[in-house]
Image (cartoon, helix red, strand yellow):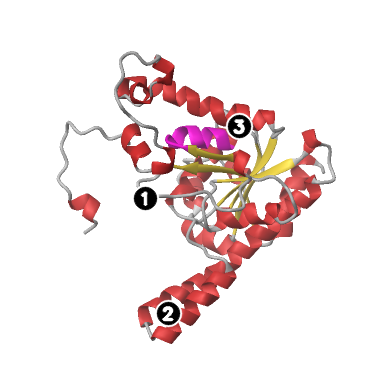
Amino acid sequence: MDPIQSLPHHITEHKLADALADLLNHPADATVLNANAYRLAFADPEFLLRRETRGIRIQLEMLKPDLDQSEQGIDNTVVVFGSARFPSPETAQALMQQAKSEGDAQAIVLADRHLRNAHFYDQARLFAKRVASYSATLEAKDRFYICTGGGPGIMEAANRGAHEVGAPTIGLNIALPHEQRANPYVTPSLSFKFHYFALRKMHFMMRAKALVAFPGGFGTLDELFEVITLVQTRKAQPVPIVLFGTDYWKRLLNMDVMLDEGVISPEDLALFHYVDHPDAAWDVIRRFYDL
């Protein structure tokens, strides 16, 4: 059994992550948190981390990344989602060599899976490079910038592809109980960390002109369906939604079941496109905007 599920639970527990605990899990961010009644309220970190000031923190998480991106001329992004667990081909090869040298059968099985999925890393890297190379020829106001969750795996690959052609790249990271850092290809002045998933997802959508979802887990699905729902309900303007890896997505999600049961409309299936090559993903975006 999952040790988290086996712990005792109490009805009086607060279910949302505690901001103070979140901060203390990330020592690099921590300020000295000593109570001081005479300190100005807006300069008092202990006060700002109280449960009662959550609304203020939400507003700050809304404002900081928005203002910083606006000041740096970031208006249009192509958001790339996908698994944090897919390594680069070179890393996958190294893991296989290590597993074989140690004769560890379980490690070999895991390394084989890493090798099988590493091509998605390369494809995300190539796609981002294609977007950034095209954008370099445009005026600043018309450029697309690659935006990811800022972590490893597919996110790293996309940031890396844009970085390799000299383009700024954006990372919207999330503070988790285990220490997590932005990947090295995110532009430092465009590397943001969030406490609230909801605010992070809002920032993904605020500047997104396209979404490309590579195979991923719960986080990828959460972000994908957030976008599909916003577009379907007209709470957001239509954007190209690209599902990269046809076999994965069709094995994972049988959209026809929803259509057969009448919970979506036939036209809802046109909200997204399946592709298997970086050029095909870029072509979906180019056709949408007549580029």
Q: Residue at x 74, y 49 (%)?
A: 132
| Secondary structure category for the residue under label 3 | helix
User: In the rendering, which numbered label is found on residue 178?
Assistant: 1
For mark 3, what is the residue? 206
Q: Is residue 73 left or right of residue 157?
A: right
Residue 79: quadrant of the picture: top right
The amino acid at mark 3 is Met
The amino acid at mark 1 is His
List x then y, in percent, for residue 10: 15, 37
Lower sequence index among marks 2 and 1: 2
Lower sequence index among marks 3 and 1: 1
List x then y, in percent, for residue 256: 51, 52
Q: Residue at x 44, y 50 (%)?
A: 180
Residue 105: quadrant of the picture: bottom left
Quadrant where the C terminus sits is top right
User: In the rendering, which numbered label is found on residue 108?
Assistant: 2
